[in-house]
């Protein structure tokens, strides 16, 4: 099975998305998935990621992909899910195109899989629109990985990926919703 993860900007998000989805597929019983992150064309933000023309370009370029997964930040926009639903509807005619918006940023999924400082309440982290600046970056500094690949995203993303059940439990509206949709697809796909 060939899977293409499409981040709104791969430069940092790739370090989170690749380990999370690699581990997620293993938990779904698909350890032989060929997973890649879309680098070409490079999307430069959520505005480009939500453009139908850009997604068509990607789907046409990567013809051998079985599942396309677009992952963007919600950024406090409660209408973003509806836009993703419309975008998905344009593609699910012969290929699988799934889209999800992380509440509120992709970095939240990493934090959900980590042991956080005792004074942090998960409800506060989950509700924060600027989770990257308020929680992720300070944690990367505290853990001594802020100067590593992706500002700590590689190290923390790999660590968080070992705890997919916690991410699914703490992020039911986004990560778990996507995981359930992927599980349905995996079950309905010939091995």
Image (cartoon, rainbow, N blue to C red):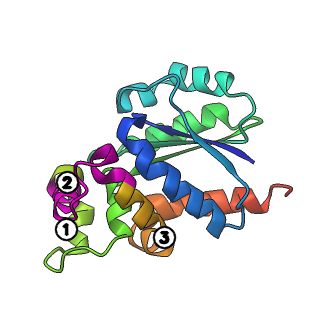
Looking at the picture, tell me which residue is in the foreground, 38 or 88: 38
Label 3, on which residue? 162
* Residue at x 29% of width, y 49% of height: 148
Decide: marks 1, 2 in contact (CB < 8 A)?
no
First in residue order: circle 1 vs circle 3: 1
Placement of the C terminus among the 4 image quadrants: bottom right
Task: Give the residue at mark 2.
Answer: 137
Give the Cα distance between marks 2 and 3.
20 Å
Number of marks present in the image shown: 3
Q: Would you say residue 106 is visible in this rendering?
A: no
User: Magenta segment range?
Assistant: 134-154
- In the image, residue 50 sits, relative to residue 168, either above or below, namely above
Left-right relation of 177 to 157: right
Q: Which of marks 1 and 2 is in front?
A: 2
Q: What is the spatial separation of the Cα atoms under label 1 and label 3, in whole angstroms? A: 23 Å
Q: Determine whether the residue tagged by mark 2 lies in a helix, strand or loop.
A: helix
Which of the numbered marks, if any, corresponds to residue 157?
none
Circle 3 — which element? loop
Q: Nearer the viewer, residue 117 or 121?
A: 117
Residue appearing at x 50%, y 56% in the figure:
19
Instruction: Name the residue: 73% across, 28% down.
Output: 63
Return the residue at label 1: 124
Query: Which secondary structure type mostly characterizes the magenta part of the structure?
Result: helix
Sooner in the amino-acid sequence: mark 1 or mark 2: 1
Which residue is farthest right? Answer: 190
Report if residue 17 is visible in the image: yes
Q: Position of residue 69 (x, y in %)?
A: 57, 43
Q: Tell me the quarter of the picture where residue 21 sits.
A: bottom right
Please say whether residue 142 is one of the residues in the magenta stretch.
yes
Q: Name which of mark 2 and mark 3 comes first in the sequence.
A: 2
The residue tagged with tag 1: helix, strand or loop?
helix
142 on left or right of 47: left
């Amino acid at each position: 099975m060939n899977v293409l993860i499409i981040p709104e900007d791969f430069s940092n998000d790739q370090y989170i998305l690749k380990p999370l989805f690699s581990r997620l597929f293993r938990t779904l019983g698909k350890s032989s998935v060929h997973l890649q992150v879309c680098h070409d064309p490079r999307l430069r933000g959520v505005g480009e990621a939500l453009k139908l023309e850009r997604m068509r370009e990607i789907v046409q370029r990567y013809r051998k992909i079985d599942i396309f997964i677009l992952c963007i930040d919600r950024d406090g926009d409660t209408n973003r899910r509806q836009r993703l639903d419309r975008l998905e509807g344009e593609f699910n005619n012969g290929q699988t195109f799934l889209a999800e918006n992380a509440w509120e940023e992709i970095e939240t999924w990493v934090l959900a899989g980590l042991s956080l400082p005792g004074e942090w309440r998960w409800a506060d982290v989950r509700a924060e629109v600027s989770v990257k600046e308020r929680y992720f970056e300070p944690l990367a500094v505290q853990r001594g990985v802020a100067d590593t690949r992706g500002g700590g995203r590689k190290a923390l993303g790999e660590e968080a990926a070992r705890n997919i059940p916690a991410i699914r439990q703490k992020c039911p509206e986004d990560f778990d919703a996507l995981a359930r949709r992927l599980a349905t697809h995996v079950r309905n796909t010939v091995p």
